[in-house]
Image: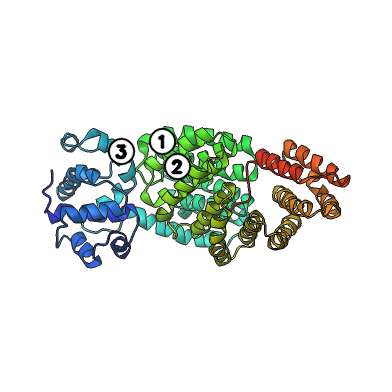
Amino acid sequence: MARQGDPADLRLVVSFLRSLSKWTQEELSKASGVDRGLISDYELGDKAPSRRTLERLASAVRLPYSHVEALLPMFRAARLAAEGGLNAVSQADAKVPESVADGLDRAILGAVIPRIQPHLLELEALVRGGEEVPVVQNRQQAAELWEALSKLSPKQRRAAVEAEPKYWTWAVAERLCLESVRAAAHRADRALELAKVALRVAELAPGSEPWRSRLKGYTWAFVGNARRVLGDLPGAEEAFVRSDCLWEAGAPADPGVLDGSRPLDLKASLRRHQGRYAESLALLDQALAVSQPSAAGRILLKKAFTLEQKGDYTRALEVLSEAEPLLDRRDDPRAPAILSFNRTVNLCHLGRYVEAQALVPGLRELALGLGNELDLMRALWLEGRVSAGLDRREEALPALEQVRRYFTREQIAYDAALASLEVAVLYLEAGRTGEVKALAEEMLWIFKAQGVHQEALAALKLFVEAARQENATVELARQVIADIAQARRSAPRMH
């Protein structure tokens, strides 16, 4: 094992730990409590960190120190190999030389290699004396190319990709996939368009056929995700079947630059949408096992959402608390709002409205900061629910009425139905049956909306007919709300 005080080896360890979370030295300093100047000295090889300092740095990036200790021989071998002119750390299958592996705990190695694999190319650059990292450079170029593509119409974007080889890289495909996920929150059609362009880039990318297979498998997962958001579940299932086959076929040629947790967590979203919660949670656990620390918060948010949909509200709150310190706000500025929203939803499910009320002002501020009308409406909807749960009808009714009108105007059928029914509950509690009857007439357009499940329509029809006869009751309205939510498996939320 490498000598604990060897600066030449330990500088690689410190740089590697920082790269796991893609942090600057200042960010690692804040997370670990180790002085930024010392971190710089460690990475330059001017000083060697003590064991205690390494433990603090490893803890900050959520890597057990026993794993770091077991990997020290690998870092030493990588440095010696690079000094000898060998390319020992960029092997496609991330194998450790036998002479090194013999000294490692096999169980630890098996747990750590999937997490460090995406960073082996960065490590190669480090041991070669600070050359520009190819992976980082490729992603920077992809970001610049995306700026150009983002200004084009879908038709122009596809034509540019077909005609210009500069777009035919794995990093551009990856960037298009990222933009597809971002678009899915508000524009499912745009999400699908971008995922299809990413797939075309993967088909055109240079390299071996196995490597293209790996890249196509990655992009097909995003096609599947966009189809899921559009409501095309059979198409989404087909896309994930293709993704799985291509991804696995390309495994031997994978240099480790793609985030292997993404196909897993996107497929988990489909399983959750299908009500297959055990499978969804299992996929998310697999995604966590191979994820980079910067992705763990995102995956835990999905896990909490799945638990909430499953009805395990207490466990969902626990997972949200696990996710909170791990969210990468630079990667997803909406993450804090999503976490706060989902925490409030679960508290409402548990009838803990006083606790939920304390979160409402912060949630409203986060939604305003996002500058998105839909997010703001969903925050207002939740605020109305909290007020209703606290028996503050005079505050709840205006909020829910505003939300109902918005979803009706935007022709968002499920949300319009649910918000209307929640307004109906408040009217019925106040004995205002005439207004409930008028409200039912305003809901008739929902029966002609596309994509609404027949079971949801049947439940809604029951309520509308009762309201027309002025026979609707609070109990009936609440039962229909539950039936519609069950049919859709989606309460109001931020995605």
N-terminal label among 3 and 1? 3
Task: Please count the marks in the image.
Answer: 3
Q: Position of residue 315 (x, y in %)?
A: 48, 43
* Between 78 and 138, the one nearer to me in the picture: 78
Q: Which of 475 and 62 is in front in this view?
A: 475
Residue 389 placement (x, y as % from top left):
64, 54
Q: Which of marks 2 and 3 is in front?
A: 3
Label 1, on which residue? 250
- Residue to which mark 2 is pinned: 215
Asked if residue 133 lies left or right of residue 41, the reply is right
- Residue drawn at x 35%, y 44% is 256
Helix, strand or loop at mark 3: helix
Image marks 2 and 1: residues in contact by CB distance under 8 Å: yes
Q: Tag 1 or tag 2, which sits nearer the N-term?
A: 2
- 244, above or below 444, in the image: above
Report whether 248 appears left or right of 125.
right
Q: Which amino acid does label 1 sit on?
A: Gly
Name the quarter where the N terminus is drawn. Answer: top left
Which residue, as the protein is rendered here, is positioned at the far right? 469
Tag 2: amino acid: Leu
- The residue positioned 77% from the left and 42% from the top of the image is 460
* Mark 2 surroundings: few (<14), some (14-19) or many (≥20) residues within 10 A: many
- Picture residue at 32% right of the left edge, 49% below the top: 62
Helix, strand or loop at disc 2? Answer: helix
Q: Any mark on residue 111, and which? A: 3
